[in-house]
Amino acid sequence: MIRIYVPRDTTACSLGADQVAGRFATAIADAGLNMEVLRNGSRGLYWLEPMVEVDTDRGRIAFGPVGEADVRQLMADRFWEGATEHRLALGLTEEIPFLKNQQRVTFSRVGIIDPLSLKDYCARQGFEGLNAALSMSAQDIVSCITQSGLRGRGGAAFPTGVKWQTVLDTPSDMKYIVCNADEGDSGCYADRMLMESDPFSLIEGMVIAGLAVGAEQGYLYLREEYPLAHTVLRDAIELARHGGYLGNNIAGSDKKFEIEVRLGAGAYICGEETSMLESLEGKRGQVRPKPPLPAIEGLFGKPSVINNVVSLASVPTILAGGAASYEGYGVGKSRGTLPFQLAGNIKQAGLVELAFGATLRALLEEFGGGTRTGRAMRAVQVGGPLGAYLPESQWDTTLDYEAFLAIDAMLGHGGVVVFNESVNMREQARFAMEFCRIESCGKCTPCRIGSVRGVEVIDSIQGEAENEPAREQAVALLEELCDTMVAGSLCAMGGMTPFPVRSALQHFADDFKIS
């Protein structure tokens, strides 16, 4: 039987993938052909979605972007025979440069398997990490993660093994695994792609984390704006339970673990781990002061492992292949790979998983292909709305945590938003303060009041554009306000909002002089 793959991914569906799949199904039925339409996840080449693939003797061949109106001609051209001359033909999927030049480790199954097929998952090394973990002691599992060099992929880049070790070493009658899937950073969609396209990898990672620290209950805190991910996760958890990978006697062992999905309520601040814990406990999402650390007193006051989706989904690969295999990717203290997500004014928007060590310029030019409008790139924001705006002089910076820290920037969750030469960076600085004003939990004064004053001061700079002394005084006041927010805020919401503001002032000063 010939298989036709049409992605069932939020972005692909928003571009008409459901309608395309329906047209293929109808055409196949009408022609009485021995074919089936499978809904895989997206490969992450979003400028080509919906990207349809078909199995051939040479491998999968891709076509895209495919619209409803294209289905009839594709069928008439018998595209499943490898119609490489068709105007939508992209050739062998694995040979498309955007994919071929990546190092897909955590995302190795994304876009390839049926997301809700345990058979497909197991056929591609699924649950091999769990099987390895079941033969190891808790300490050996934690040591493996520590040796791999895995760091949190959610923003702070804290060593995962250190966090797990703390939870393991803290005595308690109950411990928890909490997956932070409240992916709210602008330009970020890696978590969503994983949950929609390879949910069992996340489930497996959470189970292994439970084995590592002695936890039997996991919570997955999902942003409510991801309804398809919610549906897929709910079905995947049920399938995993029936398959013996959740509940009692996991994979025939005497171990047990359960996962419950909880939906957020649209608050950006709940992406901060302590605010998320408050929300999970049924309270208003507000930042908790530290100490105590969540690894010691977390959910319901118990020791808790808190990692994001990509961090936990990376764990099965590490356990299956060994720490050295994962550590072999990357540079310096940045080991493994990171999924970079290209967005904004970029020609080839999509997900690129690379080992740490490439440059930002290579990511933008070799994978992104320049701007969508054809105008020159002017600024790039990496790491979400709290990330710095980087001018061209910094695009040769190596994509690793320490290199970005050295230029007062951050990699964060790997979101990369591109702006062309038409952007006004004063407006972008104002947006950073305005975003903080709207999303602040309000618990600490520097963030709650500082963001309001930040908007006012930036507006005053614009108003004094022709009065140089007054303008300089306003800029000095803004810089002092940024210092206060960095030094006095309880969490990264207020403490990092100055990053984009300061970078705009430093690298795009002319935009603060024009009325």
Image (cartoon, rainbow, N blue to C red):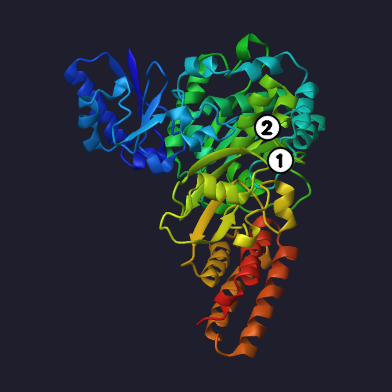
Counting from the top left corner in percent of width and height, residue 309 is at 59, 36
Residue 176: mark in rendering? 2
Amino acid under disc 2: Tyr
Q: Nearer the viewer, residue 303 or 369?
A: 369
Tell me the element at label 2. Answer: strand
**Farthest-out residue, top:** 252
Q: Is residue 268 left or right of residue 160?
A: left
Decide: few, some or many residues near mark 2? Use Cα within 10 Å; few <14, some 14-19, many ≥20: many
Kind of residue indicated by mark 1:
Gly
Residue sitting at 68 percent across and 12 percent down? 254
Residue where numbered disc 1 is placed: 298
State yes or no: discs 2 and 1 in contact (Cβ < 8 Å): yes
| Residue 231, x across and y down, in percent | 43, 32
**With 264 as the anchor, is 41 left or right in this view?**
left
Q: Nearer the viewer, residue 22 or 95?
A: 95
User: Could you tell whether 86 is left or right of 152 in the image?
Assistant: left
Q: Is residue 127 above or below residue 161?
A: above
Mark 1, other Cα within 10 Å: few <14 / some 14–19 / many ≥20: many
Classify 106 as above or below 239.
Answer: below
Residue 56 makes an appearance in the image: yes
Extreme residue in the front direction: 85
Location of residue 22 in the rendering, given as x and y in whole percent from the top left corner? 26, 29
Q: Give the residue at x 79% y 27%.
A: 143
Quadrant containing the N terminus in the rendered view:
top left
Q: Secondary structure at mark 1?
A: loop
- Give whichever of discs 2 and 1 has the lower sequence position: 2
Which residue occupies the foreground of this view, 46 or 235?
A: 46
- In this view, the residue in front, 490 or 322, is 322
Residue 184 visible, this orientation: no
- Give above or below for 249 relative to 296: above
Q: Determine whether, in the image, residue 468 is placed left or right of residue 3.
A: right
